Amino acid sequence: MKGRIGEASRIVIKIGSALLVEAASGQLKNAWLESLVADIAQLKARGADVIAVSSGAIALGRRKLGFPSGPLRLDQSQAAAAVGQIALADAWSAALGRKGLMAAQILLTLTDTEERRRYLNARSTITTLLGQGAIPVINENDTVATSEIRYGDNDRLAARVTSMMTADCLVLLSDIDGLYTAPPGTPGAKRLAQVTEITPAIEAMAGKPVSGLGSGGMITKIEAAKIALGAGADMVIASGHVMNPLHAIADEGHCTWFLAQGNAATARKRWIAGSLIPGGRITVDAGAQSALQKGASLLPAGVRGVEGEFSRGDTVSIINEQGFEIARGLIAYDADDARMIAGKRSADIEQALGFHVRDEMIHRDDLVLVGPTA
Ligand code: GLU
């Protein structure tokens, strides 16, 4: 596959309900799903990580429960999702399985990606799945969500997942083939090929949400673009009403690309370095300092001291033996546990604590060098 999708190393694909579920019959569009999975298999074959964020649970479940068409109450939507999610996960698992790929179902709520401890847990689970070659198939955990389920939530959820997983490309497949200079249908409205900045003028083009079976309209897609671009990922809005929709983007380019200025690692590291106030200080020895400066993770063995109160997932400062801050990172252990394992080999963590979270005290993906040595 050519183009940005073909070159991306970690791709999040959001699939709208209307693409997967036939509106009139409530049936799953299996042939279309097969064609998307064929595209995904190609990306996997060349070594990319692929994550699907799939809507469709409510659309699939509502008919099975005999609910009428038209808007559902919240409890009805949640009930429909409970029934439909099983069918949705089953369809993904079967379609991916036919290509020799493994589906992994993950149900998230938006708050899972906001709260850092849950964020770290979700991220490490998804990282493990990707490492084993599985395809995470993510949806919102609709049945336990406490706020109104709004179509379009999955646009933002997909963008949060993109940021959380430092993906470099987010694909929003729906029934809209891009951002137009005026609402589609307006005479003279033109699709933009490329957007590099979300200006007020761009936001104004988004107009009002259009409600079909599951289209979040343009407003949530622009919200998603802000999150994706802020995290350093490119995003594309494209129509999924074609077979092999990822190939269609690469070959025909009927879409709108939102292009990030900079790369994912830089944006994430900016977030760690700039947006959080460190709650603790970790002093490291000279060996650990030089390893960190070469890009390694912080292991407990190189830690000489742990000061302050903090929880797993908080930002801490890393201080060298001369007392200078050399790095910041998101720590994988609570303060008391970090004190217990300071100076110990990773192999001895379990004996010290009675449990083992991870070998690194701060993983290199969660670490940014600061100060004059950076
Ligand atoms: N989570 C909903 C579902 O699977 C869809 C929400 C959305 O499309 O944004 O039915």
Image (cartoon, rainbow, N blue to C red):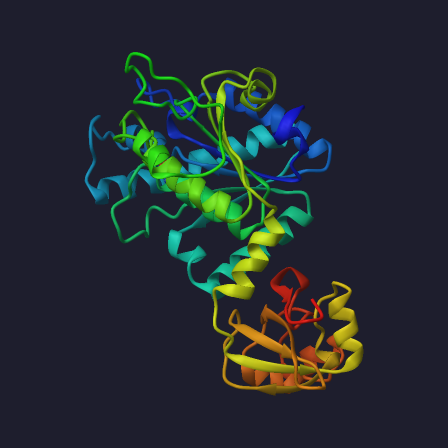
Q: Quadrant of the N terminus?
A: top right
- Residue at 72% in and 86% down: 321
In this rendering, the answer to whether 15 lies above or below 324 is above
**The C terminus: image quadrant:** bottom right
109 shown above or below 38:
below
Q: Residue at x 71, y 86 (%)?
A: 322
In front: 373, or 77?
A: 373
Residue 359 sits in which quadrant? bottom right
Q: Is residue 251 left or right of residue 72?
A: right
The residue lying furthest to the front in this view is 372
Q: Is residue 139 visible?
A: no
Tell me if I can see residue 181 in this picture.
Answer: yes
87, 316: nearer the viewer: 316
Q: Left or right: 64 with respect to 318?
A: left
Name the residue: 31% across, 22% down. 182
Where does residue 262 sit, x and y in percent of width and height?
59, 45
> Residue 369: x and y, percent?
66, 67
Q: Position of residue 18 (x, y in %)?
A: 37, 25
Q: Residue at x 60, y 21 (%)?
A: 250
Give the answer, above or below, for where 145 lies relative to 65. below
Pick the residue in front: 129 or 233.
233
Quarter of the image where one finds residue 59: top left
